[in-house]
């Protein structure tokens, strides 16, 4: 793989943020900077503050790491068996970052001290005025059960790589866009939709009826003025309907939020219309530490080991490589 092609794997969700440089930079494994990785030529094409210079300048300074905070759960609602909506008060400095598309936090129960109990949870919605977030949690094991069991939880964040294609979400404007949702992955659609609306885009939402449908999400989408069409649709059987809409409305961006198999179905439908349509998908890879350190999120793409908890990867490339 030549250097230009490798740039597809050098887009880091943390680059330029207050959490950069990170542990990977100081260990010589920076996702973005070729010089830090030991290469002789700078090919990062980065237009922000030079990460290499920041590392050299701050080797003897403490790193700015994400910290965890004990936060109040001021509202808890059981939506269905083992499925809960939580509203959590978070520090004010964190709240604006959690408005970003693909933002998530690590949660663990009040009584849990070790990091191994951290569970990555997508941020569904943000209340800036009250400095609170809404999350939906399905209790499937010791990590998530401990979060539900208390009126306070440990919150660590913010993290940003919950979707692949963040740049497309932030830069697409004055265009027709489509949001296609399936299952619990639909919870991260609200931040996506809000970002697209701020850029004067027109949005139509499609929700697959073959998986759980969350009324909370539907209400939020409709309250944002976005039409869900139709409200009940088997997207596997009615792909032609979606294809016709994409073609007729000259759609420029599609966000698909579901398992990789579902996202691949949407990709194939989109590509049958035009491969020039931007495709953004939910990040369904295993995430543990959120910092690219533990290696749990690492996936192989074109012979490269990619840390998917931090790396922004081309959506089509990851779906074509995935077997899930």
Image (spheres, rainbow, N blue to C red):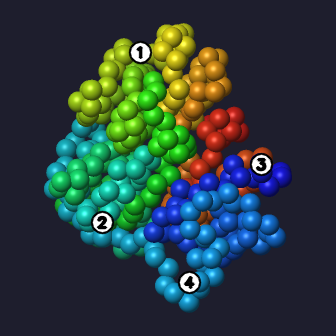
Give the class, few, some or many, for how many residues have Cα within 10 Å of label 4's Cα (few <14, many ≥20).
few
Q: CA distance from mark 2 to mark 3?
A: 37 Å
Relative side of 129 to 254, left or right: left
Q: Which mark is residue 93?
A: 2
255 over 105 or under it: above or below:
above
Locate residue 29: give its quadrant.
bottom right
* Element under disc 4: loop
Residue appearing at x 37%, y 16% in the figure: 229
Tell me what residue is drawn at x 71 percent, y 52 percent. Answer: 7
- Tell me where residue 261 appears, x and y as whole percent: 58, 31
| Extreme-bottom residue of the structure | 60
Residue identified by numbered label 1: 233
State the separation of the CA atoms marked 2 and 4.
Answer: 23 Å
Note whether residue 134 is visible.
yes
The residue positioned 83% from the left and 52% from the top of the image is 2
**Which residue is labeled 3 in the image?**
5
Q: Residues within 10 Å of mark 1 (few under 14, many from 20)?
A: some
The answer to the question of whether label 2 and label 3 lie on touching residues, with beta carbons closer than 8 A, is no
The quadrant where residue 113 appears: bottom left
Q: Is residue 28 above or below residue 147?
A: below
Residue at horizontal 63 percent and vertical 59 percent from the top: 46
Question: Could you say which is closer to the camera, residue 278 or residue 185?
Answer: 278
Q: Secondary structure at mark 2?
A: helix
Cβ–Cβ below 8 Å for labels 4 and 1?
no
x then y, percent, for residue 25: 62, 72
From the image, state whether disc 1 or disc 2 is nearer to you: 2
Image-based side of 107 in relation to 324, left or right: left
Question: Circle 4 is placed at which residue position?
Answer: 58
Q: Secondary structure at mark 3?
A: helix
Mark 2 vs 4, N-terminal side: 4
Q: Earlier in the sequence, mark 4 or mark 1?
A: 4
């Amino acid at each position: 793989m030549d250097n230009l092609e490798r740039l597809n794997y050098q887009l880091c969700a943390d680059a330029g943020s207050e959490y950069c440089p990170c542990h990977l930079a100081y260990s010589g494994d920076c996702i973005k900077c070729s010089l830090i990785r030991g290469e002789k030529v700078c090919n990062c094409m980065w237009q922000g503050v030079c990460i290499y210079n920041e590392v050299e300048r701050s080797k003897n300074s403490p790193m700015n790491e994400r910290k965890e905070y004990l936060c109040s759960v001021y509202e808890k609602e059981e939506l269905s068996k083992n499925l809960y909506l939580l509203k959590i008060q978070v520090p004010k400095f964190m709240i604006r970052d959690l408005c970003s598309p693909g933002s998530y936090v690590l949660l663990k129960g009040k009584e849990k001290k070790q990091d191994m109990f951290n569970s990555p949870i997508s941020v569904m919605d943000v209340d800036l005025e009250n400095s609170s977030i809404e999350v939906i949690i399905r209790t499937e094991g010791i990590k998530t059960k401990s979060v539900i069991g208390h009126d306070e939880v440990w919150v660590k964040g913010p993290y940003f790589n919950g979707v692949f294609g963040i740049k497309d979400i932030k830069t697409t404007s004055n265009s027709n866009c489509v949001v296609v949702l399936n299952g619990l992955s639909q919870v991260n659609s609200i931040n996506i939709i809000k970002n697209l609306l701020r850029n004067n885009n027109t949005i139509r939402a499609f929700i697959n009826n073959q998986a759980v449908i969350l009324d909370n999400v539907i209400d939020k989408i409709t309250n944002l003025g976005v039409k869900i069409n139709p409200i009940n649709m088997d997207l596997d059987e009615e792909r032609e309907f979606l294809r016709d809409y994409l073609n007729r409305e000259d759609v420029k961006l599609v966000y698909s939020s579901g398992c990789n198999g579902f996202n691949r179905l949407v990709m194939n439908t989109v590509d049958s219309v035009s491969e020039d349509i931007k495709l953004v998908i939910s990040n369904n890879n295993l995430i543990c530490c959120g910092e690219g350190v533990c290696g749990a999120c690492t996936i192989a793409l074109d012979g490269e080991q990619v840390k998917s908890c931090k790396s922004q990867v081309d959506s089509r490339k990851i779906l074509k490589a995935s077997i899930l």
